[in-house]
Image: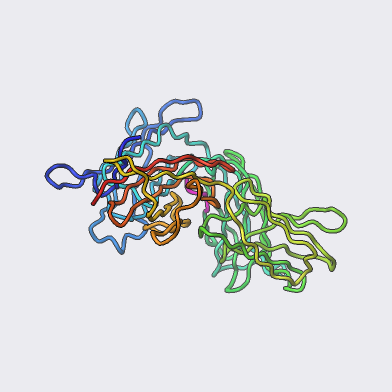
Amino acid sequence: MGLLLPSLLAVAALGRIENAEVRVRFVQPGGAPIAGVAVSLRAVDATKRPAWRDLDAVSDGDGRVSFSFEAPPACVLRLEAKATGCARVRFLWSEVAPGVVKDLGDVKLVRGGTIAGRVLDANGRAVASGWLATAEAIDTEANGSIGREKCVEHARPVDDTGQFRIEDLAPGRYRAWAEPSPGVRTADREVVVHAGEVVDVELRAGGAPESSRIAIELKGRFPGLLPDPHRISLTASDGAPRAARLDARDPSLATFEDLPPGEYRVAIEDPRFQPWSHEHARPGDRIRAEVVGNSGIRLEVKDSASGEPIRNVSVRIRYALPAASRPEGLALLETSDPFPPGGLIEGLVAGDATLVVSGPAHAPAEAPLSALQPKEVRSVVVQLAKR
């Protein structure tokens, strides 16, 4: 394997930082190009990036758009695209390094659907103002694409009858709820959106009391990389399973509502994590679930000149999902730690990530860890050059 250079070395001979580039082509489900798609590239934390300028473009006759730009270090970028009558798509990256070309290939834009309805209080009266309705995708096609941002859309009331509309949603299942006032949330409604159709829902306030709820606090090594709530199950003594929901204000909190007295078994069976379960849970319990990824790497670090192994290294991981990692990455190994036997580092979560490896006498180098699969242990060889 060749020398892996850190992103900051993507510099031309005269010291000028190379531009990064994002390319994409928008097509219909049948593959025909879509012209006139409005596309934007924005810095999520733009207030902290005074030098950044948002970019806008429209796809050409072949459906293509390309952005070339000087990439700010550790800057979260969002690409958003919208065509008339089609569902909006977004991509999110924790960083686009200098000199990197992100080619998204052909991105299909599908005809969108609509969730419409009204918000009611616990007595069935319309709540006219001061609330926000939310639709969160559960299993739309968008959720499976690398770098694709999960679809979460919001709407405020359109009139004094509590009516709302959330339009241009990709077909698929959604969880819908509203928060009519601080600390008050309606029960979740699961709805299915179809292309070109409107699905009607009523969102009614009045949550379950704590005494009839079991809450699961999800804790993991990587913030933002937590189990899918649909993989968290509660089973009563009669064997009937219940599905969890995530708290709108705290995505690390999963709850089961309106439970009759009794004992329950809670289990997490997400393919990206080691199995977890808790027996004899009762309504009113708040349970902490420490979740651990089931993927790993077998790391080998060598000096690029001599080929000799290097054991005194720092290893950090930076996940592609911004919410799952800090820009500098999360520590897997410090130079003061003993090198793991066989170079085995376990407990990682499947997904797209980058390893950053360095040593006291060696410059940092980056190694892509693309599409790490559940239960996979990937061999990674990194060569470091002396400082």
Viewer-side residue, 66 vs 181: 66
Q: Where is residue 221 in the image (x, y as percent from the top left)?
A: 53, 59
In the foreground, 224 or 275:
275
Residue 265: image quadrant is bottom right
Q: Is residue 254 above or below residue 88?
A: below
Q: Residue furthest left?
A: 14
Q: Position of residue 104 (x, y in %)?
A: 40, 36
Q: Position of residue 75 (x, y in %)?
A: 33, 55
Q: Is 149 in the magenta? A: yes
Q: Can residue 322 be seen in this view?
A: yes
Left or right of 73: which side holds 212? right
- Residue at the location (60% across, 69% down)? 180
Q: Which image quadrant for residue 292? A: bottom right
Identity of the residue drawn at 48% across and 56% down: 324
Task: Give the quadrant of the N terminus.
Answer: top left
Chain part drawn in magenta: 148-152
Q: Which residue lies furthest to the right in this view?
A: 238
Q: Nearer the viewer, residue 76 or 111?
A: 76
Q: Does the magenta stretch include residue 278?
A: no
- The colour style of the image is rainbow
Magenta stretch prevailing secondary structure = loop
Relative image position of residue 364 (x, y in whole percent): 31, 51
Residue at point 46% right, 26% down?
31
Would residue 21 be visible to someone looking at this image? no
